[in-house]
Image (cartoon, helix red, strand yellow):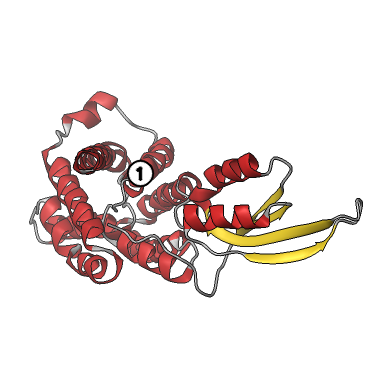
Amino acid sequence: MQQITILSTIKRSALLVAAAALFAFNLKTFCVAAGIIPGGFTGIAILFNEIMQRYAGINLPFSIVYYVLNMIPVYIGFRYIGKWFTLYSCFMVVLTGLFTDWMPSSLLEYLNLHDYLLCAVFGGIISAIAITICLNADATSGGTDFIAIYFSEKHGADTWNYIFAANCVILMIAAVLFGAEKALYSIIYQFASMMGITSLYKGYQCKTLLIITNKPNEIYALIRDKTRHDATLFTGVGSYSGAPRSLLYSVVASTEVHSLVSSIKEIDNGAFINVLRTDLLHGSFYKRPRN
């Protein structure tokens, strides 16, 4: 059992190292080339550094400002989400800050990036990939990700679009201080990033299963044991055959659907399964504890 724990820890840490390196590479290349202000506390840190450099002549390391800004979200993580989850997220935050400061600026000259629109689009995509890797390792990149996860789990719905709206406020400040062009390209970057995360990561989404079967007890036991979710049983009559039918209604996490449907088919190959998207959920719903 301990060997599995060690292997999972190594895998989790390796994913976070890769995500932090990719995130830092994106900041030092695509974001710098187009003067993009990323979303969340990363964008606030970059915006603060630019303000200090332009108006006070002070050039602060990115990591210092980034670490200070993440103190409150880290508290939220420890208090409401999970201690190990937050510790791994802190590991990600520390690595991102260090990699961003250490990564050489010569990368930008090597890539020779001049098209700001391409930088905004592909920078946003790379950001989404890095954040998705981080989320799949059961951690976050810090900052507003903690807030998004807290409200996503509390209300059972994605909140990334609300985070995008909040980021637009930051960009309005950037537009006033540094010009509208930089802010507009930053909006494209953030939109690409939010759409990428929504498409790639399904961890906070739920699906409704409607299962017509002749083996309701066995399938309910499967749902309960495999997902720890409950189900409601309805009985009726098949309109075509006139035979009695059972309908199981259950809501599960989106990431559980594929394996669950495969297992249901093994129990009852003739089961009729309808998978519906669940946009909003109220009531008691089991949440896998984060560790």
Q: Residue at x 22, y 57 (%)?
A: 84
Whether residue 248 is visible, yes or no, is yes
Residue 122 at x, y percent in the picture: 41, 37
Residue 159 at x, y percent in the picture: 45, 63
Q: Residue at x 69, y 54 (%)?
A: 211
| Residue type marked 1 | Ser
Residue 237 vs residue 77, the one in the foreground: 237
Q: Picture quarter containing residue 14? A: top left
Taking the image as shown, residue 38 lies to the left or right of residue 201, namely left
Q: At numbered mark 1, what does the secondary structure look like: helix, strand or loop?
A: helix
Residue 83 vs residue 189, the one in the foreground: 83
Q: Quadrant of the N terminus?
A: top left
Q: Quadrant of the C terminus?
A: bottom left
Residue 222 vs residue 286, the one in the foreground: 222
Taking the image as shown, residue 282 lies to the left or right of residue 117, namely right
| Vertical placement of residue 49 versus 150, above or below | above
| Vertical placement of residue 142 versus 126, above or below | below
| Vertical placement of residue 44 versus 27, above or below | below
Whether residue 172 is visible, yes or no, is no
Taking the image as shown, residue 207 lies to the left or right of residue 36, namely right
- The single residue placed furthest to the top in the displayed view is 110
User: Which residue carries the number 1 mark?
Assistant: 127
Residue 249 at x, y percent in the picture: 65, 62
